[in-house]
Image: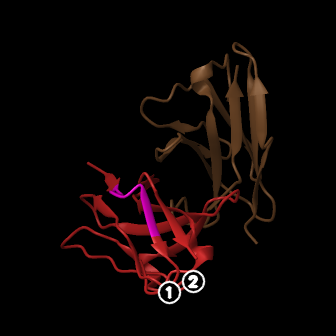
Chain colours: A red, B brown
Amino acid sequence: AQRVTQPEKLLSVFKGAPVELKCNYSYSGSPELFWYVQYSRQRLQLLLRHISRESIKGFTADLNKGETSFHLKKPFAQEEDSAMYYCALGTSDKLIFGTGTRLQVFP
Amino acid sequence: GAVVSQHPSRVICKSGTSVKIECRSLDFQATTMFWYRQFPKKSLMLMATSNEGSKATYEQGVEKDKFLINHASLTLSTLTVTSAHPEDSSFYICSADTSGLQSSYEQYFGPGTRLTVT
């Protein structure tokens, strides 16, 4: 079955604290994993993808095929990081989204 | 670049009426557009894939006669919710494929349309 699981609905941290948003996937093929972010009152936008192995806004995510995970990490959270984060799995013809994790960063 | 717009941003309609939502790619041509539905506290659910000049491909469980999709041009796809009912109230989001290779990855999202059926 093709599935993306984000176990945490809400993650609250203080500014400057490390952040890890968990994502696990189930897919029989070769996975393409993405993180999308939706800031308050804004559209969904691509944050990063595993194939580019880049760091965007201080966020990184490493694909771990053994653990079927693609956790999103940031060493020092900022207030402007508060948003809804969706992990997504790209199959041959569509994106499958997780249920999302709301990140709240308190000052 | 790669801006996708949706119109209207918010619509309220009476039960039994139909409502049309437009999705436009403003600065690029999109051979493929996707329509999603976002439930409160739930995930984004792909409803259908819209290909310019051909019939849309609907996901399992999505009624094609209820959610009519038309992709008449490379910059416009429309979703018409026919005979709307309160349970159709939701947030509908479209995205457009920029890759031109029918890849599911290069997608840019519209701002969404909030539909409320009374």
Can you see residue A102? yes
- Chain name for mark 1: A
Residue farthest to the left? Answer: A66
Asked where in the image residue B99 lies, by quadrant, the reply is bottom right
Give the residues in magenta: A5-12
- Residue to which mark 1 is pinned: A55
Mark 2 and mark 1 in contact? Answer it, CB < 8 Å: yes
- How far separated are the C-alphas under marks 2 and 1? 7 Å
Number of callouts: 2
Classify the position of the C terminus of chain B by image quarter.
Answer: top right
The one of A39 and B67 positioned closer to us in this rendering: A39
Check the image and report above or below for B14 versus B58.
Answer: above
**Same chain for marks 2 and 1?**
yes
Residue B29 figure quarter: bottom right
- Which residue is drawn at the image coordinates 69% and 29% (left, top)? B116
Q: Residue at x 49, y 76 (%)?
A: A14
Query: How crowded is the residue under tag 2: few (<14 C-alpha within 10 Å), some, or many (20+)?
Result: few
Residue A106 occupies quadrant: bottom right
Asked if residue A107 is positioned above or below residue A4 in the image, the reply reads below
Does A67 appear above or below B57?
A: below
Q: Quadrant of the N terminus of chain B?
A: bottom right
User: Which residue position holds label 2?
Assistant: A57
Helix, strand or loop for disc 1: loop
Q: Is residue A54 above or below residue A9?
A: below
Look at label 2 and name its amino acid. Answer: Lys
A62 displayed left or right of A34 = left
Q: Residue at image x 46%, y 44%?
A: B42
Give the structural element (helix, strand or loop) at label 2: loop
Task: Name the one closer to the observer, B36 or B89.
Answer: B89
| Any part of residue B48 in sight | no
